[in-house]
Image (cartoon, rainbow, N blue to C red):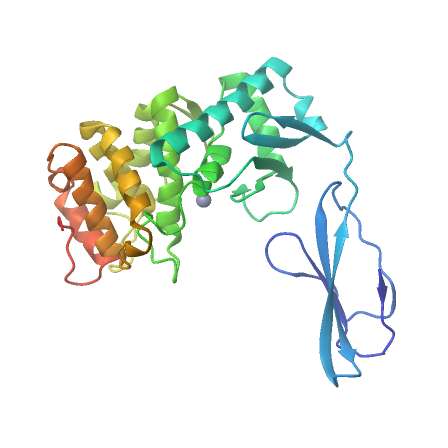
Amino acid sequence: MEFPNDACPHNRIERITHGPWLNVANPARSGIYTFINLEPGWTYQLRKHFFNQALGRMDYRIINVRTVHCNTYFARFQTRDLIFYLRQSDVDRISSSNLNTWMNRMQLAHDDMYHLVGRRGVAGSTTIRSTRYIGAAGLSGNPILIAHANVTALMDDITRHGCWSFVVLHELGHNFEGGAWWTFDTGAHGAPSTREFAANWMVAYVMSRRNATITRYGRIYVGIAGYRQYFYATSGGSYRNVFVHNIWDRNSYAHRFSGNALLYTFLSIEAQIGWEPFRQTFRYFNTLGSSTPPAPIDRVNLFLTRLRDFSGGRDVIGMMNPFSRFYYGLRFGGAGWAIRYV
Ligand SMILES: [Zn+2]
């Protein structure tokens, strides 16, 4: 790319793929810049900052750069609702039958999540794409992005353990969480732990229906029992640490909340009432639209009330540890708010 020659010391060039703009040249001098390590079949944006003489101030231009797709680099696969772009070097690590089994399992997971919540977050096909530039193991949306290193490790985990992939399932789960509709967030301020809780809840249904195998930090978890154990004892902010041993975040009273402990709370309710009341509660929330209660505490309480109703009157709040009820009231409502039926 060429850069304007106006001798301004504040000229700079940045680029973005996902996340923040990255400085390429600051200050940038006039001339030709060459970008390396770009991946085939991807769109990059460049942002040129320069002094705009006509406006009399700094200005910028955004340039989209589409790199050419390269079939020898990425292999494309498709199931009914999913399109996969995987590096050929990763595909070469695994037998085609194992790879097909895994992709069909991801399709089953997609079907399960739809079966659980009764609505899709993405219209049409969802692309799952291996990529270089993300600041996380995976990112939800369409495309779902999974970092190359995780895809490489996954191919080996599929071969060794028949894994389904927690990372892919989790990002797929985000696509079904339906905005703020039952994550108990207002959406305005963001509360990452409950979004993660919602995505992990979708994964729970797949673990339960398919007796799926996943690995987390080098350990293997099988089926809903393994998944429950992970959130009870092993995960960061586990239920055991938060509500049994009370060692989580002991210095921060108001922030004593963990989406992972909340997940275990819901899993322990599910173990007693089954999935059907949850499926019906999601469908009830789907019908609310703009009449969804705006306050998180009211959403939690409405959700638990409908769970009670759809489980034939089972006292689901009574199934919760009183200590956890107190903190959920504090976390979702504030001081003086309680978890209760509405
Ligand atoms: Zn997430």
Give the vertical position of 202 relative to 156 (above or below).
below
Give the vertical position of 239 relative to 257 (above or below).
above
Residue placed most toward the observer, 12 or 205: 205
Instruction: State the image coordinates of residue 216 (x, y, percent, origin top left).
Output: 44, 32
Instruction: State the image coordinates of residue 174 (x, y, percent, origin top left).
Output: 44, 42
Q: Residue at x 19, y 50 (%)?
A: 301
Instruction: State the image coordinates of residue 212 (x, y, percent, origin top left).
Output: 41, 22
Instruction: State the image coordinates of residue 115 (x, y, percent, origin top left).
Output: 37, 30
Question: Which quadrant would the N terminus be assigned to in this image?
Answer: bottom right
Q: Residue at x 27, y 37 (%)?
A: 264
Give the vertical position of 90 relative to 24 (above or below).
above
Q: Residue at x 71, y 52 (%)?
A: 44
- Left or right for 194, reference 132: left
Residue 12 seen in render: yes
Residue placed most toward the observer, 108 or 196: 108
Q: Quadrant of ligand 1?
A: top left
Q: Residue at x 39, y 27 (%)?
A: 206
